[in-house]
């Protein structure tokens, strides 16, 4: 059978391409760290890494959810608005204690996810359109909830989420690690995870195999919103303030970038959890490296754009190889 | 053939000589000669993949031929794009109306060539009057100010036709124009076609409905595997002969025993496991009833468009029914739910394996366990050990050739992919297996294996419904054959009747069909 051997018989150039697709993001991180080791003073220090990790947490958590929807061949543009809504809900209920406030914030975010999922799975609205509408409407709702005001949050228990550490590791980073682990298990070890990638690989085939396609899709959008809400809570704790007008602005773009450069194809059917983590870290490191060298932020954005193009180009190469 | 006609017939409007077209090494058309004369109505016939649509696309400028030449009114012509062909007077009416649904009837008719007033603006009044007058010439009376989509599908088709003809068309190509029309609408269409022909407009008519072909077409060109296998008058052919030409077999050849790997087949005994009654869905199937018993393979015969795939889809819960009921082991199965059908034990191998069957990016293991996954999991967590046990059994039993169960399924050959699909369903312990073209696009060796497997599964007591466009597969694989035509059961062949000859006759709606019947006798019956 020629088909059996074809994977082995890839031409040399193809093999390099496959390597880059699979490990390119890790390679890029390694190169960047190497560069900083030699050219950036005080970069390779524990303090610096602690700061970098703290800063990457919101994007990373949002990107985890984004990886799930992209795995189903969808997209979620409303994650920033969900963060804003969850941030707006916190000061309203912080009087009941940090945990009830956080739970209510996540529930509020999940409502947006439910709206996304319903439109996409039941009505058949394209994901980009459905989530675009909630990206706009969601932030509007958040501003209404917050009375269009910035509110400071001073509950010490809540603020610990932004500042507290265990053995030097910030709570928020630990929480992110736990979430990475949960999503990885969900994707790789559960029926739900397999159904998710099957839907992304071929929705029609999944339907004809009797999978609960609609239910899975709705759940995914709710999960993504839940993750974004958690990111919104962490961000609020870090800022000691609920800022629904700006929190999560443009985060959907960073999250999509992290997912794509992490090796999850936009065409769905695969979810790379570790790759997504690496993608988010790479973005953070690039931004940090440029800042340390006093390069204006505008260049950081341009660099991001170049990386996105490169990552998408590499994935396209994969499709051509097949 | 064409020379015989040329003495009496008018000059050719559109011709193709030696046209060839190749797609990535596969010849879709080879040395195709095609002649269409003014006022002629020509049926372009052929089974799936025969090259009909490629030829139409070459004639209308969608594709450029790799070889050969197109002639228009005797002059060499080449169309770089569809609009060139339109300007040259070749219009095409597709199955789906491709006009602008939200615009009015008049706007659609004059789209891109609206009458202007002296300020250069669109003269709506004139446009509406012209549109009304144009439609009236074909005896179509409709408010031209209504948006197109508010009209019935058949009426939309008429509007498309009127538009096509009003652009000075000399040739109108119709690709399955009646597939979504009501009987009454079809009559109107035929009347319009008659009027067009009397104006000297030539018609190319593509349809799988034999009745229509014989009712309105004069000449026929039959394509098979990209080549023209017949050119001539339709009245010189019987229906059976036409089908034989399309399928590429002669009645004599059929008598010479089997070509498939099926062993002995027998009718099932006992109570039917699956009972379908009055399965109906508008435009697709109507009043179909079936009884399938354990241990038998029932063939579902029918030409393309006869409703055979739709019947399977209805039973598998893929297609919502307007009416009808399906019972498995005496229990009613909810229509329109794949999950309900699977739960009841009815599973379907879809016709389009690549688009509807496999999940290409997943491994063989994941593809096999796809449907059975919840059973192989505990509290939602998958169990690799349970999966491997099942996957191992089926990979061995079905002889799936692969490097390992981890191999990505899209790397497998078509035959092995099909076995993966069969394994997916067998893992569900089904009672009824619905097979839609199980051996299409797989190589000869794998084909024989799949056929032998179907046999074996029936022997083990599975009830199987087999749809195949290969006659010998249906005839040799099935104990009895239910023949569908135009969405209804035409007749059922049992025992000694299960022969290609009987099947072919039934496909075209001839109840007792000696193949040597004269064309005149057939005409009489039409």
Image: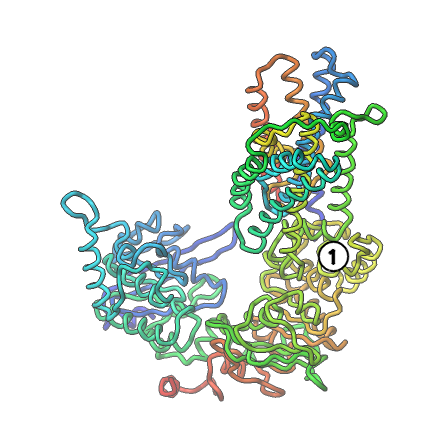
Residue B269 at x, y percent in the picture: 71, 86
Q: Residue furthest left?
A: B118
- In the figure, residue B319 lies in which quadrant? bottom right
Question: Which is more toward the observer, B220 or B484?
Answer: B484
Residue A242 at x, y percent in the picture: 64, 30
- Residue at 34% x, 51% y is B82
Q: Residue furthest front?
A: A95
Q: Against B459, is A190 above or below? A: above
What chain does badge 1 belong to?
B
Residue B120 at x, y percent in the picture: 18, 43
The quarter in which the C terminus of chain A is drawn is top right
- Residue at 65% x, 46% y is A222
- In the figure, residue A181 lies in which quadrant? top right
Image side of residue A121 versus residue B52, left or right: right
Judging by the rendered image, the residue that carries numbered circle 1 is B401
Question: Which is more toward the observer, A57 or A300?
Answer: A57
SS at circle 1: loop
Question: Which is more toward the observer, A18 or B271?
Answer: B271
Q: Say whether residue A2 is visible.
A: no
- In the figure, residue B457 lies in which quadrant? bottom right
């Amino acid at each position: 059978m020629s088909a059996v051997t074809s994977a082995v018989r890839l031409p040399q150039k193809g093999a390099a391409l496959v390597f880059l697709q699979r490990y390119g993001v890790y390679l890029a991180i390694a190169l960047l760290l190497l560069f900083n080791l030699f050219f950036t003073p005080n970069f390779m220090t524990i303090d610096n890494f602690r700061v970098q990790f703290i800063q990457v947490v919101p994007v990373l958590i949002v990107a985890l959810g984004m990886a799930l929807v992209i795995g189903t061949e969808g997209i979620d543009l409303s994650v920033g608005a969900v963060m804003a809504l969850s941030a707006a809900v916190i000061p309203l209920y912080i009087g009941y204690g940090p945990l009830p406030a956080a739970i209510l914030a996540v529930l509020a975010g999940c409502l947006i996810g439910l709206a996304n999922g319903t439109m996409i799975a039941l009505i058949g609205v394209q994901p980009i359109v459905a989530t675009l509408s909630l990206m706009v409407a969601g932030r509007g709702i958040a501003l209404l909830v917050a009375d269009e005001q910035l509110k400071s949050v001073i509950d010490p228990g809540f603020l610990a989420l932004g500042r507290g550490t265990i053995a030097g590791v910030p709570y928020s980073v630990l929480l992110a690690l736990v979430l990475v682990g949960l999503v990885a298990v969900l994707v790789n070890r559960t029926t739900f995870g397999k159904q998710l990638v099957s839907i992304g690989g071929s929705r029609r085939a999944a339907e004809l195999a009797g999978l609960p396609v609609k239910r899975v899709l709705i759940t995914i959008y709710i999960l993504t919103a839940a993750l974004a809400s958690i990111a919104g809570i962490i961000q609020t704790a870090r800022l000691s303030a609920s800022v629904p007008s700006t929190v999560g602005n443009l985060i959907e773009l960073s999250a999509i970038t992290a997912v794509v450069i992490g090796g999850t194809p936009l065409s769905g059917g695969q979810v790379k959890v570790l790759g997504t983590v690496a993608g988010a870290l790479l973005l953070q490191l690039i931004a940090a490296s440029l800042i340390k060298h006093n390069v204006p932020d505008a260049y950081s954005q341009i660099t991001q754009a170049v990386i996105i193009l490169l990552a998408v180009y590499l994935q396209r190469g994969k499709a051509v190889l097949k | 053939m064409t020379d015989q006609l040329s003495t009496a017939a008018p000059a050719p409007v559109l011709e193709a000589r030696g046209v060839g077209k190749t797609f990535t090494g596969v010849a879709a058309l080879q040395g195709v000669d095609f002649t269409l004369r003014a006022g002629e109505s020509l049926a372009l016939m052929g089974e799936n993949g025969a090259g009909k649509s490629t030829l139409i696309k070459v004639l209308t400028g969608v594709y450029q031929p790799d070889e050969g030449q197109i002639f228009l009114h005797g002059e060499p012509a080449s169309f770089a794009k569809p609009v060139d062909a339109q300007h040259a007077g070749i219009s095409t009416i597709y199955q789906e109306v491709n006009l602008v649904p939200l615009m009015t009837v008049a706007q659609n008719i004059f789209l891109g060539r609206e009458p202007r007033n002296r300020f250069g603006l669109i003269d709506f009044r004139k446009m509406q009057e012209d549109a009304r007058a144009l439609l009236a010439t074909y005896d179509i009376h409709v408010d031209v100010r209504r948006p197109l989509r508010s009209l019935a599908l058949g009426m939309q088709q008429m509007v498309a036709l009127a538009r096509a003809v009003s652009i000075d068309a000399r040739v109108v190509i119709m690709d399955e124009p009646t597939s979504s029309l009501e009987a009454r609408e079809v009559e109107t269409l035929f009347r319009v076609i008659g009027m067009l022909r009397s104006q000297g407009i030539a018609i190319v008519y593509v349809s799988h409905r034999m009745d229509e072909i014989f009712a309105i077409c004069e000449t026929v060109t039959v394509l098979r595997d990209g080549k023209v296998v017949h050119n001539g008058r339709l009245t010189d052919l019987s229906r059976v002969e036409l089908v034989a030409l399309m399928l590429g077999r002669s009645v004599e050849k059929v008598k010479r025993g089997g070509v498939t790997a099926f062993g002995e087949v027998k009718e099932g005994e006992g109570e039917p496991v699956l009972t379908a009654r009055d399965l109906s869905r508008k435009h697709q199937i109507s009043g179909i009833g079936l009884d399938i018993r354990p241990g038998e393979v029932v063939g579902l015969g029918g030409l393309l468009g006869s409703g055979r795939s739709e019947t399977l889809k209805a039973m598998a819960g893929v297609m919502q029914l307007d009416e009808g009921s399906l019972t498995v082991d005496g229990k009613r199965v909810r229509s329109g739910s794949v999950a309900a059908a699977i739960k009841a034990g009815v599973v379907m191998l879809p016709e389009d394996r690549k688009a509807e069957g496999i999940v290409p990016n997943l491994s063989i293991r994941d593809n096999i366990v796809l449907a059975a996954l919840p059973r192989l999991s505990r509290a939602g967590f998958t169990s690799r050990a349970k999966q491997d046990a099942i996957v191992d059994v089926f990979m061995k039993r079905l002889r799936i050739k692969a490097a390992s169960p981890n191999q990505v399924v899209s790397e497998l050959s078509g035959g092995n992919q099909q076995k993966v699909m069969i394994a997916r369903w067998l893992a569900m312990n089904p009672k009824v297996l619905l097979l839609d073209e199980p051996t299409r696009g797989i190589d000869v060796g794998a084909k024989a294996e799949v056929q032998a497997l179907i046999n074996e599964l029936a022997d083990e007591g599975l009830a199987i419904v087999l749809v195949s466009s290969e006659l010998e597969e249906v005839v040799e694989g099935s104990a009895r054959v239910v023949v569908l035509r135009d969405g209804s059961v035409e007749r059922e062949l049992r025992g000694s009747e299960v022969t290609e000859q009987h099947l072919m006759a039934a496909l075209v709606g001839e109840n007792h069909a000696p193949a040597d019947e004269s064309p005149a006798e057939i005409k009489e019956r039409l």
